[in-house]
Structures are given as C-alpha cells and as structure tokens.
Image (cartoon, rainbow, N blue to C red):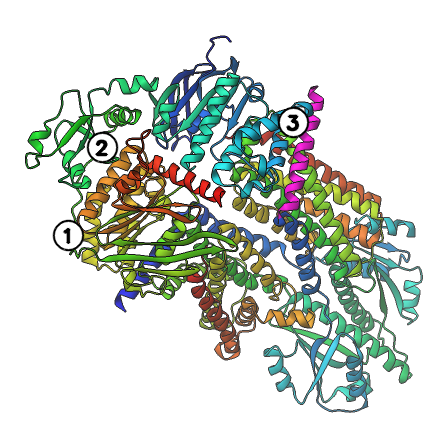
Amino acid sequence: MTNRPALIFEDVSRSFGADDTAVKALHNISFSAQPGKICGLIGPDGAGKTTTMRIAAGLLLPDSGRLQVLGIDVVESPLQTQAAVGYMPQRFGLYEDLSVQENLDLYADLQGVGLQQRRARYEELMHMTNLAPFTRRLAGQLSGGMKQKLGLACSLVRTPRFLLLDEPTAGVDPVSRRELWAIIYRLVKQQGISVLLSTAYLDEAERCDDIVLMHEGHILEQGSPRHFSADMRGRTFHVNTPSLRKRILLRRLSTVPGILDAVVDNENVRVITRDTTAPQFAAAFNDITDLHVNAAEPIFEDAFVARLKHWQPGNQSALELRAKTKAANEAVIEVNSVQKRFGDFFAVKDISFSVMRGEVFGLLGANGAGKSTTFRMLCGLLPATSGELTVAGRDLRRAAADARSRLGYMAQRFSLYADLTVSQNLNFFASAYGLNRRQRKQRIDWALETFDLAEHANTGSGNLPLGYKQRMALAAALLHDPDILFLDEPTSGVDPLARREFWQRINALAESGITVLVTTHFMAEADYCDRLVIMAEGEALAQGTPAELKARFRSAETPDPGMEDAFINLIEGRKQERAGI
Amino acid sequence: MTPAAATRMRLRAMIRKESLQVLRDPSSIAIAFVLPVLLLLLFGYGVSLDAKHVRIALVVDLADANTASLSGAFQHSEYFLPVSYQNIQQAEHSLQAHEVDGIVWLRNDFSARLLLGDEAPIGVFVNGVNANQARITQGYIEGVWHTWLASYAREHGHEFKLPVVLQPRIWFNPAVDSRNFLVPGLIAIIMTLTGAMLTSMVVAREWERGTMEALMVTPIRIWEITVGKLVPYFVLGMGGMLFTVAMALFLFKVPLRGSFLVLTGASALYMMVALGMGLLISTIARSQFVAGQIALVATFLPAFILSGFLFQISSMPEVVQLITHIVPARYFVAILQTVFLAGDIWPVLLGNSLALLIMMLVFLGIARRNAHKRLD
Amino acid sequence: MQQSIQRIMALAIKELLAVLKDKRSRIVLVGPPILQLLVFGYAATFDLNDVAIAVYNEDRSAASRELVAHVVNSPNFTLHGYLENEHQITPLIDNRDVLVVMHIGPRFSADLLNGRSANVQLLIDGRNSNTALLVQGYISNIVSDFNLDWARRHDLPPPPATVTVRPWFNANLVSRWFIVPGLVGVLSMVITTIVTALSVAREREAGTFDQLLVTPLRPIEILIGKSFPGVLIGVLEGSFILAMAILWFEIPLRGSLGALYLGMFFFVLSGVGVGLMISSLALTQQQGMLGAFLFMVPAIILSGFATPIENMPYAVQLLTYADPLRYFLIILRGVFLEGDSYALVSQYYWPMALIALVTLSFAAWLFRHRMN
C-alpha cells in the first residue's frame, strides 16, 4: 500500500446562495486523510462538515481550490471518483418502500457488482450488520439504528477503497452506535479501507485515528485525539463536595477567576482552567470545608471547548428571576400507567412517574423511544389511550385556557415563526399569554437583554444561527413567568458551548423554583437532572436520581460508570430478560 | 463487465426499483388512475354546453287557434320547457328571478296581423347574461318558428316562401352533442396533468427523502436515471390513458372514427411531451410541494384554456393566439378531436404530431441540459 | 373578554405578517390572479371572431354575390377562399383549414327570382359542436336579414309572423360580460382557499402549532385569528378584480355595490371555512394543497361559471347546492348585469353563511382532535 493520502483538500472554498446574500460554507480549507485510517471531521452544526463530504464525493463543485480522492481529481472526473468511493449521506437514501434485500440489490446493480460475487458479499454484510433475519422487511419499518446499518451495508456492496460517512451515528441509541463503530473498525482493519467520518458527538472523536476540527467553515486544527488532549494536561479538574448541590457548585465554580469552563460530569463538576496555573479554589469556597479537587484525565471535549471558547468567547449574562414560593415535596406532574397506541403500535407502554415542584426531571432515551409522545401527552397535545396524566392537578387536554398560562413550552427544533422577526415573535407570544401592554414591554426588554437577543431583535428568526434560535425559543417560553417549563430536546444540534450556556440557564431556573421537564437523547446531559426516567421502545426501563441509576451498574470493570454505561446495561439486561422468557 | 453490460444492469435496476415503488405507493396509482376517473366523471357529467330543456315563459294575450298551434310547437320541442303566464309583467318578473331563461310573448294583435300577413311579431326576450346560452336559445327559438311557419303556410294554402333557406349540415357530430368534443379534449387535459405531475413529483420525492444523494454517488449516469424514471411512468401514464379512452368510448359513448392505433401512437407521443414537462419542472423544483404547484399552474391551466379544448383559438386576441402555439395540449387536442370524431385525417395528424415531436425534443433537451449529477 | 380580544388580535396580526413576509405567498397573491384575469378575460370567450369560411358559389349571379358579401364582410368571418369544385370541400374541412363552407347551388338565382325558396348549403365542422352551433346561428342571422331585405325590395309577401329577439341585460350578447364578473368569484375563492388551506398545515409542519395550542388561546380564538387574514385578503383581492372588471374590461355595474359586498363577505367567509377545514385535516402542506385542489376544481366546474347548472344531470345539480361559488356567481351577475339590489339577491346570502358556519365549526373542532 502506498502512503499517498486517501484524500487531499487544498484551499477549497465554497459558498451558497445568490451573490448578495451568499453564505460562505467553507473558507479555504486544506487537509488530508491518511490511507487505512479513520479520519474524523468534528464540529458543531453549521461547521461545514456535510459540505466537505459532498465536495469530496463530487456532488458539489468547490468555488476554488483543488482536491483529490485516491489520486483522482474529483472535479475533473466525478464519475471515476464515485466508482471508487462509498458514500453514506446523513439521511441515507434508503428507499423506505423497498425491502432490505431490494435496497441491497438496487445498489449492487448500480455499482455493477457481478451476480457471482454478490452472494458472498451479501452474506458478509448481513452477518456484519446482524440484519440477516430482516431481509424481507421494508426498510421503512426498521428501527433507526438498523436503518443506519442498512445504509452502511448499501454503501459497502462493492468494497470501496475510500468510505465517506456523514454523521452515521446521529440520533442512534448508544448500543447501535457501538455496533456501527465495531463495523467501521473491522472494515479498516481487515480490508484496509480509508474512512472519512463526520460526527457531532465529541466522545466519538476519541475513536478516530486523526481529527479535523471544524468550526464555521474553518479548520481550527488537525491532529490525533491524543494531540488535542495533550495540551490540556494540567488544566482539567474534577470538583465535588457533599455540602453543595451540583447545580449550585457549578454556578459558583463558573464565577471563579481562572476557570474557563465548568460542566457537570457524572457526579463531579468538571473544570477547565485558562492555563496551567491552578485556580484558587480554597479562596472562592472558604465557607466549605469538604471541597474535593482532583486532577482529571483530559479528554477531547476539553480541548474542543477550550479552542471554541477561544474562537468565540461566550456570554455569561446571569438570568434573573423572581423566586417562586417553594412547597417542598409536592408533586406537580403525575403520570399514572399511561399508554399510547397508534394503530397497533404502542408508542408508550404503561409508564408512570411523578415530578416534584422545583425539580429538573429528565426523559432520557434514543430517537423513537417514546419520549416525545409522553411529552406531548403531558402538554395536552395528544390524548392518552389509557392512564392518567395531571399537570398542576389538571389534565391539560381538558384544562381551561388559564391553566395553560402557567406553563412554558419549548418545542423540538425551536419552532417559532421563521418569517417573523425576533421581537415580532416575542410580541406575539407575550400577547397570546395575555400580558398587557406595560407587562409586554417590560418582559420583552427583559428577554432581549437576558438572552442577548437585543442586537437581533429585528432579524428574521429563520435566519438566526441555531444557538440563537434556541435562546429565543426559551425566552418566548419564559415571557409569562411560568411555574412549569416543558423542554423537548432543547439541545439537539446545538454546539457544546451553547449547550453549556443553556444548562446554566436551566439550573438557574430550577434554583428559582420553576419545575422543569426535559427530554434528551444526550446521555451526558442526564447528569444535570435531579431525577430521570430512562426510556426505550416506549417503556420506562428505570427511574431515579442519576447517582442511583449509575450505582446499580458499578462493577469491578467499571468502577465509575457513566450514564451511557447505565443505559447500555439496561438495554442489554432487557434483551437477556426477553431471551430468557 | 463491459460498460454496455453495466449500463444495462443499472437501467434494469432503476426501472425495477421505480416499478416496485409505483406498486407499493398508492399515490402514483391514484394520480394515474383515480384522478383521471374523477376528472372525467366530473367534466363528462358536469360540463355540457348544450341547451336542453330551456325554461321559457309563454305569454299569450289573446288565445285562439293560431296562438295554440304556436304554443304547441314550443311545447313539442325537446329544447324547451314552456310555462304559461297570464301577463307579461308576471313573466318579466320570473325572468328577473331566474325562474325562466326566456319569454315568448304573443301580443293581443298577433292573430289579427297574422291573418293580414302583416309580419305578426313574436316577441322574444332572453336572459342575455350567459351570452353563449342566449345565442343557442335564440337559435332554437328561430328553429321552432321556421318549422311552425312552414306548417302554417301549408295548412292555410299560403304560397309563402322564404327567399333563402339554409340547409346546415354539421359534420362529424350531426346530433351536436357537446360531450362528443368535450370528452376527447378532456383526455388531453388529464394526460397533461398526470404526466407532468407524476414525473415532477417522483423526482422531487427523491430529493426530499435524500435518496437522490445516495443515487448520485453511484456510477449511474444522469441519462440512466432519466430513462429509468421515464419508462415506468410512461407505462403507468399510458395505462391511465387507455383507461380514460375506454371510459370515453363505453361510458360516454363517444364515437372513435379514426383508428385505435393512431390514437395510441399520438397519445404515446403526447405522454412523452407531458413527462418531458414534468422532468423539466423537476430540474427546477426540489420539493414535491413546489413541483406539484408548478405542474398545476404551468401545465393544467394553459391546457384548459389555451388548447382550443373549450374556447375557439381563432377567436382569441392575436397575442393570446401566439401564446397558444407553445401550449403542447393545443396540438394534442386537435389530434384527439380529429381522431375521435373525424377519422384518420393525415394532414391534421402529421402536422400536429410533428409539433409535438419538436416540443418533446425541446423539453427533454432542456431537462437534460439542466440536470447535473451534482447537488447544486 | 378583553384578554380574549387581545389574543385574537395578536394572532391575526401574526397571521397577516406570516402571509405577507413569505416571498412565495406574496407572489401567489399577486401574480396568478392578474395573469388569470387577463388570460381568462381575453381568451375565455365563446364569441366567435374571424371564423375561416370558404365559399363554393356555383351561381355567379349578383344575388348570390350579395349574399356572400353579407357573410364574408361580417366581422365574425374571414374568407379563406372561393372554391372551384365540390372535391375541394372535404379536405378543407377535414384539415381544419376552414370551419365552414357555404355552398350555393347553380339554380340559386333562378329559384330566388322565380319565388321558390333558394337553398344554401352550410357544411360545418362539428368537431367542436358548440362552435358549430354558433356558426350556424351567426349565418342564419345574416340570412334572415338578407331575406327581409330581399322581400322588401322585390315586393314579395312578408312572412306572416316574425321573431324579434331582445336579449335582456346583455344586448349584444358579449361573452366577456358573462365571464369576467364570474372571475371575481373564482379568483377570490382560489386566493382565500389557498391562503387558509396552508395556514394550519404550515404550522403543523414547522412545529409551531403545538406551541400555539399550549398557549391560553382557545380553539375559537385560534379560529377567528386565523380567519382574519383570509377574509381580509379575499375581500381586498376581490375588490381589485372588481375594479379591473369595471375599469379595464368595462363591464357595466348596474346594481347595488353594497349588496355585492355583503355577498362577497359571506362568500369569502365560506371560502375561509372550507380552507381552514382542509387545513386542519391536512398534516402536511402538500396534503393541504391537494385538498384545496380537490375542492376548487369541482367547485369551479359545478358553480355555473362556464356552463349552466341546468344542463347538468339532476344528481350533479343537487351537489351544486353545497358549492358556495354557485350562490356568489348568481349575486355577482345579478348585481353587475341585471341591476339587482338586496331584495333580489338576499335569498343567496344564507346558504353561504350556513356553509361558513358548518365548515368553521368543524375546523375549530379539528384543531384539537386532529393530532399525531
């Protein structure tokens, strides 16, 4: 095997849109991917990952610059490139009305795989992906993880020399994610394929051989995962104390000088410092005697956050809220053996939980686990097939309008009116919640200031970056000062910095006594919740505080299990249980 | 594998894939079969330009044998539903209230002037709001008058002759049944709609579902994708066409005077034009929503108004007449009305087919030029 | 109550902004109506001009030439040419070179002068039977005039009875007077239905409808707020086309404008009702579009816009009673051409109001009950 790079980008630029409103997606990027290795393109949404992938596959022409794939000039001979590479787009183009076998046949025909070679190849792929029992099933009826595996199989029908994978693990549950990675490793190891893979999951960076870190169309840095974490050595700490709640500890830590970033990590707060001089913890926490500070092993995410904060310094305006009257141990939300059936499919099977006032309560699970259905039933948007749901003592589906005025709601994808400007949106929701003219002005001014939206007040909200949309949606949900806040996947697609900022705000809200119900598929975010339910396939697998849940799976191999370990254990435990029956 | 064999394999795979999708997706079947049936039934039964059973008010000021025979002539005509009124005021009121569409008024001096041979006036008022209907009604009334005049002259031994008598012969449709020309024209409109909608929407669907991206990175060529899509939808569209023709022949009893072969041939050509328009739309529109809307506005409306299906092209203003030349349905409507009602008249068929052929090449050519194997 | 009005106002303003700020819907509001008005106004006419005619005159007398001159000099006909023999007739008609051939036999003048009826053969292409009938009508009018004139000049006894036809309301029988007022109804229906048919579906797709439902807005408030832009835009658009009809196409407006506007209000309201009902049934904008199309095409065809309802089979006629456009067209034409006022058209208001009531109530009910 030669040592010629599998992929070379030289000064590649690309913009979209008409001349006057053109948006530059890639700014003169240059990088190369080594043969027989996994190269990871890492960056938040809007970094230019997908554009890079598409240019590499010959699907988009660069505005300027040169690129080669396996020594082929992609711009000159796209067909030759496409014959040599395998490409799996973000939403892989599976024909949902064709069966698994028919999808495979189609791509085998299109790739010109001979009939003789086919049988062995299919067998290998089906074995690799565990899809063999489902060959006759329509692709549309596969689970999210199975679809991704089938997509991968389809792009592998004729062993490519170079594989482009665009966010292959997005929205897939942790178990399927592990399986997908196992397949990719095997391909690289056994067949010497080179892989370019993009992901928004920072923990996956660790699994790549080489990382290209992208942000807003620029390449910030390229190197091995170790290279990234190496210069974080001496700047990462775990802090915990039994005398403060994590949430409060986090808030206090983020104000300590010298600390760049603080984030809840498992049972600790993880701290990144500005440089290797250790911050004065003792001085800042002189009221606490049992503060434990330990050096932590740096990971890629630390490096990522440190670089991004350097790139775009975050804003930390505090969220000021009126404290709510607290009546401890009063259940605000109660869910009692609720089921939801669509046709003969149970989206939610017999789920029960209750949420106390002032709690942050999480619904955790992969896409399609039934989180959103449960959530929509609670908000009164869907009727339950059976069981009881009450919010503040009432069923929202039948509740009068004023009951709804006590809760805030933030929908998935931050759904506000894209054609309207930020202030028009806020004005509408303020009026819809019945604020009078004076209150409206006061609250909107408050929201624009608190959420740093003032300079975008007259921007069409559809044109805002995702992080701002999320802030605006949260602002709109808080205008009427609700007692209960419903958040549906509030952080999906948002970059890690915005996520941190967001959770800080949620923490402050919870501190002021607002009850928060949140759904998420990010396992790590579960640690921000006071209590949570883990869901899979419509069922509640377990519930409790994060510490309780993780403690159940502490073992010799994993002395300090994370939420992801707990999740995977729960899923596999259930599989075994089923096999046992 | 030789390149030719690989191409064959890819083409076969595309056609098989599209066919399977058609079979499994009820919406394309609905566009190809259900939509045509609905439209044909709706238009076939809902649209008729013939005036039958026109409600007229008969006002006879002074009844006698002569007025009775004239009233009888109206009563016996299949075109009229006469209602007798006592006086003209009542009748006029009825006309205003839309209870009748016309008034036939025999004044009290009618019989007297008739006997004198003094051009006894038969007063006729019609509601002129719907000018077309009014003209047709007027023609029918004059027809009744002519017939009555002839029989009156015969009975009274008058030697009355009209100087010039017209002997109209309406070719191809002697019964003057408007359904006979509306239904063939409808076939053109329905094929336009299904053809353009089918292709533009299935291509847009591939973009929407992200499957186009996956297709494009395979070694398939753009023309192979095009052909792979055209073939199944051509077959489907022609199936819909045969179905509507069968309905025209057996349900609406429209005569087919030309040969079935010519009809099929011309329809196949037009189907290609419609699919070509659909492909052209699909190179512009990447969502099913936009594609469907453009298909509706750019193909359906012109086919309806500017094709000569309902409105005589030669009577339109010059500018509009020029525009009709780029409406493909114009040529196909001419072919259809000729093949159904007149027969295989080659000068009409060849000229219009040539125009269709040129339009097909233009549409497919532009579509081919606009289609890149790229996402931008 | 005051809060309720405030919420409705907020929603109405938001809806209006959403329609007007979207470039695509702005284009939909302005472009197609004007284009359709012009195309329909000019192209959709049953009146015939410049009909190609060929004359085969075997009788070369002054009388026959006079008759021919009457026909070919009429603005309705254009002379394609004179024929030399009978064999030329068939191909001319077959090939659509002419629509009608007038054949005057060799004994024409002899018959005419001898007091016998002289026959003139008319051979008409019946492929479009409506045109054929009209051609026949035009020529027979010309021949009638010729006959009267001839009789007078030659002291022949006049026919014992003559028909004098007086068309009311549209003395010259201009098709445009019939079509253009109808367009006011058709185009304002298209606009209101499209504006409203997508309004809920668009929010469902964007996820904002959920957001709306969790606010204290009641379904009835959402309904009123969402109806507002549809009614406003429908009435404005209708007024614009109305103005075009009067000023550009010069259609006489003889009746009471107030009666027309009252009708327009009820009509637009019923269009909004149907649109919102479709919209709350549809889960995607595409379904909304399809639903609007499936409603509009039959509604236009069965309204009597182009062809009279009386000609339809009885069962189909029953169906037309559910079509709001049917009533509005009667009002429009009544007010425009027949000079109607409130009294004559009042009976057509309540069916539209009823349709609006039924569809709007159903839509409001669907807001909450159509989920998943």
Give the residue pinned by disc 1: A323
In space, the residues marked 2 and 3 are separated at their CA atoms by: 55 Å
Q: Residue furthest top?
A: A2
Q: Is residue A526 visible?
A: yes
Amino acid tagged 2: Gly
Residue B171 in picture, x, y percent from top left: 84, 58
Discs 3 and 1 lie in a common subunit: yes
Distance from Cα at disc 2 to Cα at disc 1: 26 Å
**Chain at tag 2:** A
How far across and how far down the image is residue A8, in percent?
A: 45, 15
Q: Is residue A569 left or right of residue B88?
A: left
What is the count of numbered marks?
Answer: 3
Secondary structure under tag 2 reads loop
Instruction: Tell which subunit mark 3 falls on.
Output: A
For disc 2, the marked residue is A314
Taking C207 as reference, is C191 left or right?
right
Q: Does residue B130 lie above or below A197 as drawn? A: below
Judge depth for marks 2 and 3 and give the one in front. 3
- Within 10 angstroms of label 3, few (less than 14), some, or many (20 or more) residues? few
- Mark 2, residues whose alpha carbon is within 10 Å: few (<14), some, or many (≥20)? few
Kind of residue at disc 1: Ala
Q: Is residue C114 covered in magenta?
A: no
Q: Residue at x 22, y 42 (%)?
A: A505
Instruction: Tell me residue A203's x, y (percent).
Output: 34, 28
Residue under circle 3?
A: A119
Q: Residue B198 occupies which quadrant of the picture?
A: top right
- Chain designation of label 1: A
**Dot 1: within a 10 Å radius of its alpha carbon, few (fewer than 14), some, or many (20 or more) residues?**
few
Q: Earlier in the sequence, mark 2 or mark 3?
A: 3
